[in-house]
Image (cartoon, helix red, strand yellow):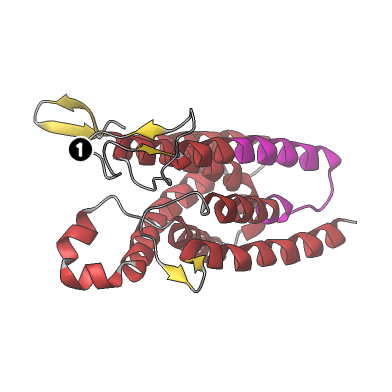
Amino acid sequence: MKTDLFKIGGLTVHGYGFMIALGFILAMILGEYRAKKLGLKDESVIDIAIIAGLTGFAGAKLLFIIVEFDSFIKNPKEVLGSSGFVVYGGLIAGFLSPLIYTRIKKLSFLPYIDCAVPGVAFAQGCGRIGCFLAGCCYGKETSAWYGVTFPADCLAPAGVSLIPTQLFSAAGDFIFAIILFILQRTLYKKKKKTSGIVTAVYLMLYAVGRFLIEFLRNDPRGAVGVLSTSQFIAIFMFAAGAVMLSRFVKNSN
């Protein structure tokens, strides 16, 4: 809940942007480290991380514009200049761009994505801490001991105790990252054809986590019937992950 972390001359470093950048850098470092362990081209991992990061950022903002289209029509500058993003847009763009890259470079897509997704989950956790600092993606009002009251300069409603959904999401993402790292290491030791399994598990874990956390959130984020936009997308993401997992596990046997 600190929108501005510090200043360097005339430059103000915002908490949200700082955590996004930190997560991205750490994800690249982790990806490069794992690439060497898995026998992949570490320079290609860096290329993929940069491309996926840039397109993912654009995709997350684009889906936010779509979800908040009425607000965008009324005040485009406010929507474009806000810290609003929809993670699913970033995930979709972040998966498609590496697919194109690996096709051009004649590399196998799945091993590189498997290598990247644990770092992606970790970066998402860092991003959610950034959300907490900015006050976006806030939760419902609560009288519980863990409730957080945001100051007036944050995006969350000020002066009321809210569920810190950002921190819950961050904790979940960090746990997912650990699970994926362990799974990746275990599968590699088995020396079997296991490409795609880590990615499939990531899709399922993230979909479940996002679907559940949406029940606690209270920020405007669009809806499809009784579900939020993110819950609606999560259903299809989980189904896709389940189909992928079934197929890839079958191929590994």
x and y percentages locating residue 175 in the rendered image: 62, 36
Q: Position of residue 33 (x, y in %)?
A: 58, 33
> Relative to residue 9, is residue 71 drawn left or right?
right
> Residue 116 at what x, y percent from top left?
57, 46
Q: Quadrant of the N terminus?
A: top left
Spot occupied by residue 123 in the image (x, y as percentages of width and height): 48, 40
Q: Is residue 108 visible?
A: no
* Disc 1: which residue: 153
The magenta stretch is 175-200
Q: Residue extending furthest right? A: 253
User: Which residue lies at the image location 47% right of the left edge and 36% below the top edge?
Assistant: 167
Left or right of 213, for residue 20: left
> Which secondary structure, mark 1?
loop
Figure quadrant of the C terminus: bottom right
Q: Is residue 204 above or below residue 132?
A: below
Q: Can residue 86 be seen at all in this image of the molecule? A: yes
Residue 120 belongs to the span the image colors magenta? no
**Please, which residue is most extreme toward the left here?**
10
Question: Which residue is nearer to you in this view: 137 or 236?
Answer: 137
Residue 18 position by quadrant: top left
Q: Residue at x 39, y 61 (%)?
A: 221
- 159 or 241, nearer to the observer: 159
* Residue at left offset 84%, top offset 49%: 192
Q: Is residue 172 left or right of residue 52?
A: right
Q: Amino acid at mark 1?
A: Asp
What secondary structure prevails in the magenta region? helix
User: Looking at the image, how many numbered discs can be counted on the residues?
Assistant: 1
Residue closer to the observer: 125 or 192 = 125
Q: Please, is residue 108 above or below residue 83 in the view? A: below
Residue 197 is one of the magenta-drawn residues: yes
